[in-house]
Amino acid sequence: MTHTLSVKRGLTNEYYRVYLTRSLTRNMEWNVHNLPEHKNIIVPTGRWDDTTGLDDPQVLTRMCEAWQAMRSHTDYSLMWADIVRQYPQDLIQALDTNDLETVHRHFTHMYSSPLTVGMSQGSNEHYLLKNNNDIAQLRLLRNWDVLMGLCEFFGILNTQNHEQGSTYLNIEINKLVEAMDHLFPGDQSFHAPAWQGGAWGLDTSRGLFTDRDLMALYYAAKLIGYFPAYGINVSKAHMCEIGGGVGYTAYWLYLLGARNITQVDLPMSLLCQFYQLANNLGPDTVSFWFEDEQTAIRLVRSEEHTSELQSRVDISYAVFCLKK
């Protein structure tokens, strides 16, 4: 079941909406119909990530080189043309002229900037979250809702069915995220991306989570789950994602053991993916198509000739492709 919660955006008649998979109420209760003793008293808390991103000249120079190699080759769809017009002009000039200080200033808080509009929060959402506490709480509720959906998918929580009567759930959020450690190979533990500059999210003992990065974990785990049926070794599988947003799915795929991932996207999206992945996995794990490094994650512009991808990828579904 899907539930919609709304709040006015201020002085206008417009509404800000979040979509939930269970009947949570705006005051963080589990179900308005439950008995008082069955209310969920766990109240999620949120915070902003103001962590400074990499100020590494080599990383920033690689981003400028990639931009200069692809900026003149893209014909944008109507939606993306409108988003591209929102990009700061001083950033465009900085990427063209290798002004690394300006490039860093924009990307270090990219989740609160126009760079991630349409992908992950972005400047419009950031403004609403900063200036309307009701909206910030609704977004936090959405993040919590997605976390519980993940816990249901992984069997940490039983699937909720409110048609069968009252639901009692009184499990601390930190216990839920800590219960996910078993998903990851070796001695790894479950942690949110350490850097998400400018993002508002769910504050937990394992870092700050947004609905976007949590949903990406679902996509990654779902994809990994198909491997046994195809006899595919996770570390050797060749995967391709088209339209990867800020690279959250590639991030989780890497942590789940994948080591041959190709991302195909538009110019600024690729730069956002590169910066996010370089910050959270290290610059040596990701490279652009024109670089010589054989890294675990490769970023390819959408216009690049597809013969290389076709030779590497032969099993596909949705936006993902696989090859043994």
Image (cartoon, rainbow, N blue to C red):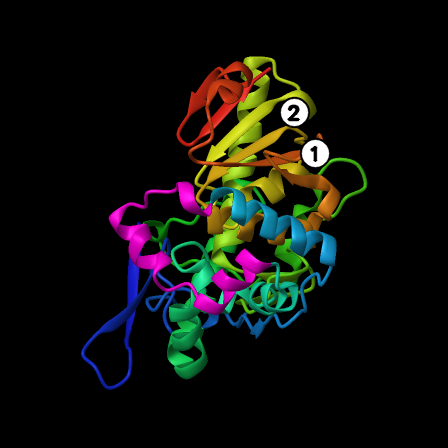
Badge 2 is on which residue?
Answer: 234
Residue 85 colored in magenta in the image: yes
At label 2, the amino acid type is: Val
Q: Residue 71, percent across and down? A: 45, 47
- Residue 2 lies, with reference to residue 140, above or below; the image says above
| Magenta stretch encompasses residue 50 | no
- Return the x and y of residue 190 as percentages of the image width and height: 69, 49
Say whether residue 247 is visible.
Answer: no
Q: Is residue 33 visible?
A: yes
Furthest residue toward bottom: 11
Q: How far across and down, in percent of the image, does residue 21 sit?
A: 37, 53
Disc marking residue 295: 1
What type of secondary structure mainly makes up the magenta span?
A: helix
Q: Residues within 10 Å of mark 2 (few under 14, many from 20)?
A: many
Q: Residue at x 62, y 55 (%)?
A: 176
Q: Residues within 10 Å of mark 1 (few under 14, many from 20)?
A: some
Snapshot quadrant of residue 77: top left
Q: Nearer the observer, disc 1 or disc 2?
A: 1
Residue drawn at x 42%, y 69% is: 123
User: Which region of the structure is painted magenta?
Assistant: 71-97
Q: Amino acid at mark 1?
A: Thr
Q: Nearer the viewer, residue 59 or 260?
A: 59
Residue 285 shown left or right of residue 305 in the figure: right
